[in-house]
Image (cartoon, grey):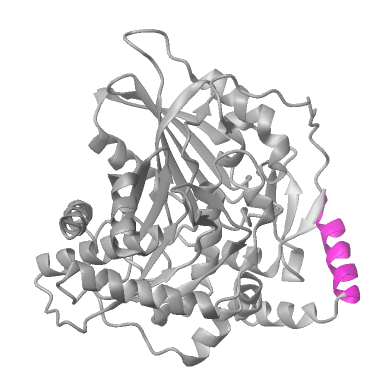
Amino acid sequence: MITRLTPQDASFYRLESSSNPIHIGALAIVRNAEHGADPVLDYDRLVDLVEARLSLVPRYRRKVVEIPFALGRPVWVEDSQFDITYHIRRSALPTPGTDEQLHDLVARLASRPLDQSRPLWEMYLIEGLSDGRCAIFTKTHSALVDGDTALEIGHVILDTGPSPRELANNAWHAPREPNDVELLVGALTHLAAQPREALEVARHASGHAFAVIGAAGRAVDSVVSAVRAATTGAPDSPLNARTSRNRRFDVVRTDLEDYRKIRKRFDCSINDVILAVVSGALRNWLLSRGETLTESTTLRAVVPMSVYVEGPDSDQLKPASEVSSFLIDLPVGEPNPVMRLSHISHATEANGKHHRGVRARTLVHLAGFAPASLHAMSVRAASTFAEHTFNLVITNAPGPQTPMFIGGARMLEMYPVSPLLRNQASSIGITSYDGRVFYGLNADRDAMADIGVLAASVRDSMEEMLGACV
């Protein structure tokens, strides 16, 4: 099967560079063995599980092929040489491996671009963690996941119980790949039927391929075009710096009940509380660097989406049918945590009145762990904003509050690993799951050597917010 990349898919594919790999990552920690018992999940079982579920995510068997002479956008083509053991890999930490060693390994894996001659994903089974745990780290190119016709692999390998659900056997046979002549004829036929795309081809040929990203952005959120035209540049910040190809990664674990307590005390949303905690953490991190802050100092964040809302009469997180995207100024200069929360609550309320959502029915009605796909869509939304208009990307995708399992092994934790966009020194991905809120902090190794300070600052900011509830 041959399908043409959409304008936004093509833009993401072409944005890839050695210093800016554009893949979304997900790190799952699972309980794999109890008291010396045999592991529940091993490499062979993981391969069998993923292979059985690939029919639910068919793009994971397809690679991107360029059209000869660049006469049109690249196409998705079934990989006739598809080898699942190339994509699913095995790694191990020196037993007993620590969390810090795991984070270092994830940082190295996240630094490596995907092989563009093959389907654009990799999965690593990381063994040797302490306390009978193992980890699964997945990398998927942002061009692959659109949240509608193509989902992230984490959506389909997770189950709601320890017994993996059975799927119908969908046998796959490697097809013959099209040759250059067939690709060229197909592209010319497509251009004849869609003459407007000839302009896109001309732009790409003259070195202006990224001009198409504006049109793609409108499909994600109509607010983007207005922001590009009207907004001023983002404040100067050490968060905006030239990036290297190497990364650092750190995490923070917090309790969802703490956010609910703050939400109830100050009559706001959990999303508002999360952004207030991040604002306080960024404030403390900036002060640790000796930055001068006034009460009016802000950092501008892209907060691409949230597809869950809180029920009016309960503490449950309910699936919604829309996603949204907006810019928000985080009040990092404000020393009072309650005032920071108030500023954010008013800002998100104002944005909520003016944004236009994108339908997300495909995501919210599917079983599995939706946040992996949602974070990928968040990165797409963030990339449509002009580079100079924001300092930081914060993706927040609430997940299920009941235990999930991978091949019978219970998932304990899940951390997003969002990519760094151009000249962005750090990204913050946030996912709630099973009563916890997990932060994944991805950062440039040179520009953010103190990412551990930011992680500690998140915990300090949470304590400060809880103290204000008394």
Residue 317 located within the stretch drawn in magenta: no
Left or right side of 142 for 269: left
Q: Residue at x 10, y 65 (%)?
A: 288
Residue 183 located within the stretch drawn in magenta: yes
Left or right side of 379 for 430: left
Q: Position of residue 177 (x, y in %)?
A: 80, 45
Left or right side of 26 for 224: right
Whether residue 163 is situated above or below residue 100 in the rendered picture: above
Looking at the rendered structure, the number of numbered marks drawn on it comes to 0
Q: Position of residue 78 (x, y in %)?
A: 75, 44
Whether residue 19 is situated above or below residue 383 in the rendered picture: above
Q: Position of residue 231 (x, y in %)?
A: 44, 88
Residue 12, image quadrant: bottom right
Give the overall secondary structure of the magenta segment.
Answer: helix
Give the position of the C terminus as an image quadrant. bottom left
Q: Is residue 46 visible?
A: yes
Q: Residue at x 27, y 56 (%)?
A: 445
Q: Is residue 19 visible?
A: no
Image: magenta residue range: 178-193
Whether residue 456 is situated above or below residue 11 in the rendered picture: above
Between 58 and 84, the one lying in front of the other is: 58
Q: Position of residue 169 (x, y in %)?
A: 78, 25
Q: Residue at x 50, y 85 (%)?
A: 227
Left or right side of 114 for 128: left
